[in-house]
Amino acid sequence: MGFQLFPTSASANAGEVDAIFWALTGLSLFILTLVFLPLLFFAIKYRRGSRADRTPSKIPTWKFEVTWTIIPFFVGMGIFAWAADVYFHIESPPANALQVDVVGKQWMWKLQHAEGNREINELHVPVGRAVKLTMTSQDVIHDFFVPAFRMKQDVVPGRYTSEWFMPTRVGRYRIFCAQFCGTSHAAMTGWVDVMKPADYQKWLVTTGQGESMEAAGKRLFTQVGCSGCHEAGSKIHAPHLEGLYGHPVPLDGGQVVTADDKYIRDSILLPGSQITAGYQNLMPSFAGRLTEEEVMELIAYIKSLADQQPPDYAP
Amino acid sequence: MNPVLDTPASTAPQEGEPPENYLTEHTVISWLLTTDHKRIGILYLLSILVYFAIAAVAAAMMRIELLWPDGRLVLPETYNKLFTIHGVLMVWFFLIPSIPAVLGNFVIPLMIGARDVAFPKLNLLSWYLFMFGGVLVVYSVIVGGVDTGWTFYTPYSTTYANPNVVTMVAGVFVAGFGSILTGLNFIITIHKMRAPGLTWFRLPLFIWSMYSTSLILVLATPVLAITLLAITVERIWGIGIFDPNLGGDPVLFQHMFWFYSHPAVYIMILPGMGVVSELITCFSRKKIFGYNFIAFSSIAIAVVGFMVWGHHMFVSSQSIYAGMVFSILSFIVAVPSAIKVFNWTATLYKGSVSFETPMLYALGFIGLFTIGGLTGLFLAALAVDVHLHDTYFVVAHFHYIMVGGMVMGFMGGLHYWWPKITGRMYPEMAGRVAALVTFVGFNLTFFPLFLLGYLGQPRRYHSYPPEFQVFHVLSTAGASILGVGYLMPLIYLLWSLRHGKKAPANPWGATGLEWQTPSPPPRDNFETIPEVNGEPYDYPPLEQRTVEPI
């Protein structure tokens, strides 16, 4: 019969989460003692028929009430602040993280590395490098959970969510789907394979498909017809994509949004929802014509244009 | 209130000719058309027992299935249907009506010196709505079952799950109206029908907790109704509310669902707290410590409880800043619960404590609820919740609150008022043993799940990695002990109906108006409406009288 008492800890954040967990455990044991000892003591000392002194206490009761209102309140605020601080940190991926795209579907995980390597229910990553997952679902809500990294995030259809981790130990760690997603929910599991950097490079080369995400996106850009309007020199009045990613976009109506993954995804699938200021709503929706993976490849391509200058003429 | 130790002997049942009481009439129709709050309470008791039995069988099958990591007993879809049945029936058809609709219905009018609730016919209608809803749910199970879990998360429930979802959701929807009407009835009863002299701060604390519960029932349940209706509309007419493919937002569902369901968690604990306040003070023979603080902490829980729903959604893609607001509010809502626990403990100080069955359940409640509450802090702490969310840690936490808390409270209250309800005493020794067995079985069932959750075992898994097996086996062993703990009262309480000792009007020597009328009470509760001219829980000072065991 298998047995394990505590979870393995294999990411930089795991230690921070565990520190709060054990502090809370210690605090809980302390409070339990504070409640149970008097409870037992009073129950025995003041049992019916005992000869204990029952002269009413002279201390005003409000002093007790104030004590046990104020102290729990401030202890609670302290834990809140600590846990919120760590949460903020574990929800903010570092800029230099390796990028992996994840698509969840009933009942499997499809993962794709920037270099183009595709995997199912397995994720190979190098040790000591931050990894950021950009995730979406093809059907219902899933959740990408790696207990050894103390990390989970719902994977929601119709939007991108992300999570990141910095593996600190070489090894194989379980992936679970943590959000109930239907019949084979319990089978929607997999493994993260944390490798030495050299082994990871070797793995990338031996399993490489040749075409990186960016290259696939560039191919699709022409293939499905984006280039007809969005490429430099096009006669159609459409926003240029060079220098777009990560920059502010003024919208029709005065709003300004940042061109992130979600913005570009929405612009491809729901082009009418956010119109760039100065343009007309001419673009057809690509919903149903592109898979989630293809949208992610297009985003990788548009991202690669982020540092280029837009063509030098008035729009 | 008069100290009941001085209750004149004339209220005790006379030997020979049994006095007329609310149970005297025996026909089935007199039960099905009754407007007597006491009889309606009993109708609820019988019906929730049936739902409890079905849900408990589902739980037993799951626990047996989980003995093996590879899921060899039932198919995955069967397992998913089992936890859905278990959740839906336990939450809406057992826990929510347990204390309010059974004990609340029976004792609220008695405790406030009224002849019935404000709207007796509406009260009966509530029960029929509840039953009709329950029948719809059971029907949806018979025709194939639903596998969404009790939370009905979209877009799974609206687009991917089988169409029985609509029937089951309709059942919960209809039963919800029963809840709303019960809440409304209680609020008006407590406002308008208190006996002369029974001011708000002379009310038993059970009434305060039922009042807070009723506020939640009336304000939150309509939101559940809207949410369920929205599922049905999307399901049947394809109107996009939640499914992103139809232009909807799946996370919107979670906001709406938890806006109801988090307050509903308090519907499933506040009444238990109310019962425990009664039991602790009665079996300590001492005025409760910090009456005002316990009373207002109930109201505080009801109010703040409406503002913490987002703590179910820290990893749902909700904004991290929203997460911080919900986290801080969740720590704040823990304070009034802590206040109650400390006040109960302080009540024992310099009391005269005896350990009859109801008191054992009350002490068990304090222990288990404290563990449940403290583990709630882990889940309110953002970074820790990221790891623990949707694992067995959550399962263990809410079972400590709902089973360790509410069911212990319900059992304690049922034993406490059993003599009043039936006119018979239950066998004390059997009661004590059952309370102990329940406590041990409960801890063995659910404590291992905290460890499993920290290890990372996700909820709603039909099979699991082999390294988790030991804890699952422990839990199943505990569940079989817990089962014995629940079967024992079923047997000896039924036995006591015929063979139990006849109960006097006030077997516990408790204060409170319900103990000043015979057991069982007459149809109209009181011969003359009592008048109240003193504080609640006004037990005589202990150093001035000899304390004798009952």
Image: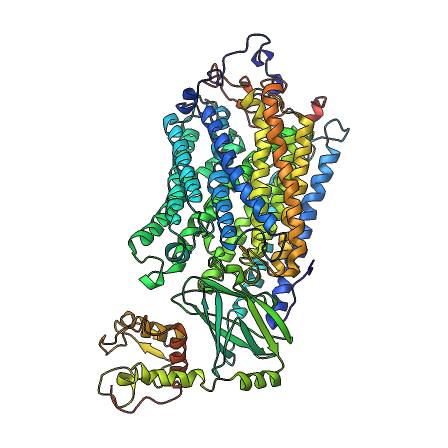
The answer to which of B461 and B291 lies nearer the viewer is: B461
Spot the residue most to the top.
B16
The answer to which of B438 and B132 lies nearer the viewer is: B132
Q: Is residue A9 above or below residue B89?
A: below
Please, which colouring scheme is shown? rainbow
Q: Where is residue B231 in the image (x, y as percent from the top left)?
A: 36, 51
Q: In this view, does B129 lie to the left or right of A148?
A: left
Q: Position of residue A73 (x, y in %)?
A: 57, 52
Q: Quadrant of the C terminus of chain B?
A: top right
The answer to which of B272 and B102 lies nearer the viewer is: B102
Q: In this view, does B436 lie to the left or right of B117?
A: right
Q: In which quarter of the image is the N terminus of chain B?
A: top right
| Picture quadrant where residue B429 is located | top right
The answer to which of B167 and B375 lies nearer the viewer is: B167
Q: Is residue B1 visible?
A: no
Q: Where is residue B10 in the image (x, y as percent from the top left)?
A: 57, 11
